[in-house]
Image (cartoon, rainbow, N blue to C red):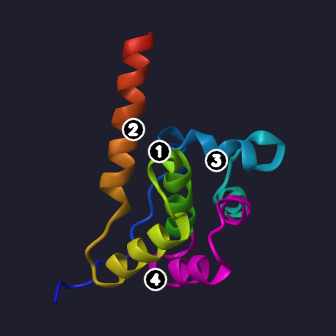
Amino acid sequence: RPKREPVRNFPLGMVMRACPEIAIYGPGGTIGSWREMMGAAVVVRSMLGVSPSAYQEACEVMGPENAATAIACILERIGHINSPGGYLRDLTRKAARGEFSLGPALMALLRVDGDSNRRTG
């Protein structure tokens, strides 16, 4: 049984670079604090059809900042995810077992954004 790692929060700026789509759900179409990010995540959670209980469980297991970040990551990849609620529950179960970290997901999204910027710029 893997040891559960302490919850690690990522810098908000990094999350916003990796997951820019969530910004439009913040107050005035921007997100400048974790409080605004968590508020936007609740709006997006509802929009994606993720149940309050799935999000609450993610908040308890991952911490509220990481749960909001997970929602932002799901929003970025929504074209590739059939069931956002099921996906979040799966990530939450993996996180509870110490088998999931948001770091690789954020890095992958940053690489995708970097690749598209290089192609178009």
- Helix, strand or loop under label 3: helix
Amino acid identity at mark 3: Ile
Identify residue for label 2.
110
Q: Tag 2: Cα neighbours inside 10 Å, few (<14), some, or many (≥20)?
A: some
Residue drawn 51% across the image and 55% down it:
74
Q: Residue furthest left?
A: 1
Which badge, 4 or 3, is on the more N-terminal residue?
3
Q: Which residues are magenta?
A: 42-64
- 18 with respect to 30 (left or right): left
Measured in 3D between alpha carbons, the distance from the residue under mark 3 to the one under mark 2, in whole angstroms, is: 15 Å
Identify residue for label 3.
22
Question: Is the C-beta separation of discs 3 and 2 under 8 Å?
Answer: no
Residue 52 is inside the magenta segment: yes
- Helix, strand or loop under label 1: helix
Question: Is the C-beta separation of discs 2 and 1 under 8 Å?
Answer: yes
Identify residue for label 1.
14
Identify residue for label 4.
61
Amino acid identity at mark 1: Met
Which badge, 2 or 4, is on the more N-terminal residue?
4
Residue 80 locus on image (x, y percent): 44, 49
Q: Is residue 73 above or below residue 57?
A: above
Measured in 3D between alpha carbons, the distance from the residue under mark 2 to the one under mark 4, in whole angstroms, is: 24 Å
Q: Residue furthest front?
A: 82
